[in-house]
Image: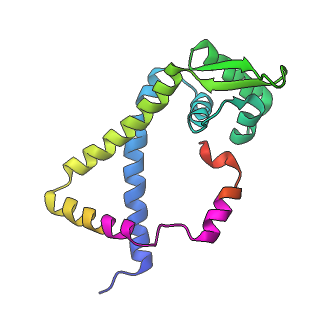
Amino acid sequence: MATTPDDLYISLEDFIIRLLSLAESDGMDALIEMDLSFSHVRTLFCLAHSAEEIPINAIADRLSLSVAAAGRNVEQLVQLNLVERRESPDDRRVKLISLTDAGQKVADQHLESKRASIRTFAEKLPAAQRESLHQSLTDILAGNTLRPSPSDTRTSQSKDSKENCI
């Protein structure tokens, strides 16, 4: 009997949710130990996804927070030496925010703990399942199913930058 798209969807959804849950759980342990709030973590990851310093109002917009709430988060993260704040050279009223080395290390460690969870999953798979999954994923990634079409590329470039933040 052929697998229907709905059958695959159900199995794939269950697999992805379980794998991501495992990785997220392991990744959150270090953040919990630091006693960071979810809002602090969102701010850190928003900054980690940005190649440039970000004004507080842009952080607020990206995270759907008030400027006051974003400012309080930034202040607390400054006190923890995870972010730094400086005046914009163009407008002294604007405060630019970026990660410190310590803040970047926290973001990197979180990502690495997720990667380690996925590596552990791959190591625990029986060899036959590992080979089968690898072959299936390799074939899918080599195909065009996951590649964006030209219209998808234009759409994604015009989307709001909120996607880069949790």
Residue beneath the point at 38% across and 36% down: 112
Residue beneath the point at 26% across and 63% down: 133
Q: Is residue 122 left or right of residue 58?
A: left
Residue beneath the point at 83% across and 19% down: 92
Residue 70 position, x and y percent, is 72, 28
Q: For residue 145: magenta?
A: yes
Quadrant in the picture for the N terminus: bottom left
**Quadrant location of residue 6?**
bottom left
Q: In this view, does 86 lie to the left or right of 23?
A: right
Q: In this view, does 31 lie to the left or right of 112?
A: right
Is residue 131 among what the camera can see? yes
Residue 121 position, x and y percent, is 27, 48
Quadrant in the picture for the C terminus: top right
Is residue 28 among what the camera can see? no
Q: Is the magenta stretch mostly helix, strand or loop?
A: helix
Q: Point out the stretch of residues depicted in magenta.
A: 137-156
Residue beneath the point at 57% across and 15% down: 81
- Outermost residue on the front side: it is 89
Q: Is residue 61 above or below residue 69?
A: below
Q: Is residue 118 left or right of residue 90?
A: left
Residue 144 position, x and y percent, is 45, 72
Q: In this view, does 36 lie above or below 146?
A: above
**Quadrant location of residue 4?**
bottom left
